[in-house]
Image (cartoon, rainbow, N blue to C red):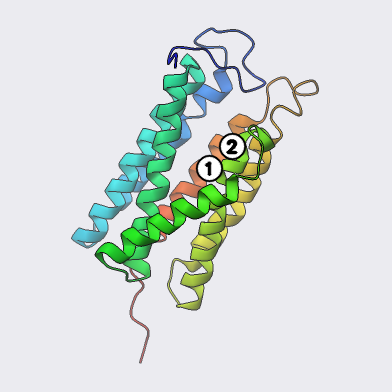
């Protein structure tokens, strides 16, 4: 496979140039801002909670770097970096949710990741490549987030509302991501840059929803 092969997947790109997607490239700053906010927010919390928050903050920063690389270089290797950073966040966050909120330990939490991986393949297999402008690949993550929000809410965890809000924003962000190519003739700028801004909000909400709930009054 030629890792340097050029890719043209979004309305905004009209040539192989580095700055052919300025809006898509610049809006990756939203991820860097989110990473800084999450890192700073980790201060003053318990050691384990701070460590978890800083891990997610670092991965959010990596998401921004990977996405910037893809929307500038627009090559196969950059796409792998972009997709790999997003996958890393999804699996890291899910592991922390299973361990910190659901209370699973060790192999049980890892087993949960395995179930998610298998379910993801099963859920996305029926979609032809390119369906919904590739957004179908995020459907398993959206479903997992919705189930996590329901679980946290039923358990009375303080993060339940944040996760529900994140799921709602996720739906809207996927809609903008999905229609990018469809609206090219009417809106050459495309809508992918909106996806960046909204998904940064989703990452902030999910990362800050893992803090332990305060004890319930007796």
Residue at 47% of width from left, 22% of height from top? 70
Does residue 99 appear in the picture of this structure? yes
Q: Position of residue 27 (x, y in %)?
A: 52, 29
The span from disc 1 to disc 2 (Cα, nearest Å) is 6 Å
193 lies left or right of 81: right
Q: Is residue 140 above or below residue 194?
A: below
Which residue occupies the extreme left position in the image?
47
Q: Which quarter of the rendered picture does the C terminus lie within?
A: bottom left
User: What residue does disc 1 label?
Assistant: 199
> The residue tagged with tag 1: helix, strand or loop?
helix
- Number of other residues with Cα within 10 Å of mark 1, as a class: few under 14, some 14 to 19, many 20 or more: many
* Residue on which disc 2 sits: 195
The front one of 78 and 21 is 78
Disc 1 vs disc 2: Cβ atoms closer than 8 Å? yes
Q: Which residue is pictured at 45% across the width and 55% down the height?
A: 116
Q: Nearer the viewer, residue 121 or 188?
A: 121
Where residue 165 is drawn, which disc sits there? none
Identified at 51% across, 22% down, the residue is 25
Mark 2 burial class by Cα count in 10 Å: few <14, some 14-19, many 20+: many
Q: Position of residue 78 (x, y in %)?
A: 43, 22
């Amino acid at each position: 496979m030629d890792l340097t092969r050029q890719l043209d997947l979004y309305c905004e790109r009209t040539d192989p140039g580095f700055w052919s997607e300025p809006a898509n490239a610049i809006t990756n700053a939203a991820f860097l801002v989110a990473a800084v906010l999450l890192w700073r927010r980790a201060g003053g919390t318990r050691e384990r909670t701070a460590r978890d928050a800083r891990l997610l903050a670092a991965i959010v920063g990596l998401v921004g770097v990977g996405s910037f690389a893809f929307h500038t270089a627009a090559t196969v290797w950059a796409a792998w970096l972009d997709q790999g950073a997003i996958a890393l966040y999804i699996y890291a966050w899910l592991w922390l949710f299973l361990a910190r909120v659901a209370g699973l330990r060790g192999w049980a939490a890892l087993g949960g990741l395995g179930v998610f991986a298998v379910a993801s393949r099963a859920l996305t297999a029926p979609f032809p490549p390119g369906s919904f402008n590739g957004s179908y690949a995020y459907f398993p993550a959206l479903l997992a987030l919705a189930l996590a929000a329901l679980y946290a809410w039923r358990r009375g965890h303080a993060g339940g509302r944040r996760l529900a809000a994140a799921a709602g924003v996720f739906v809207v962000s996927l809609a903008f991501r999905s229609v990018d190519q469809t609206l090219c003739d009417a809106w050459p700028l495309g809508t992918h840059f909106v996806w960046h801004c909204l998904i940064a909000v989703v990452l902030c909400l999910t990362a800050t929803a893992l803090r332990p709930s305060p004890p319930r009054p007796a």
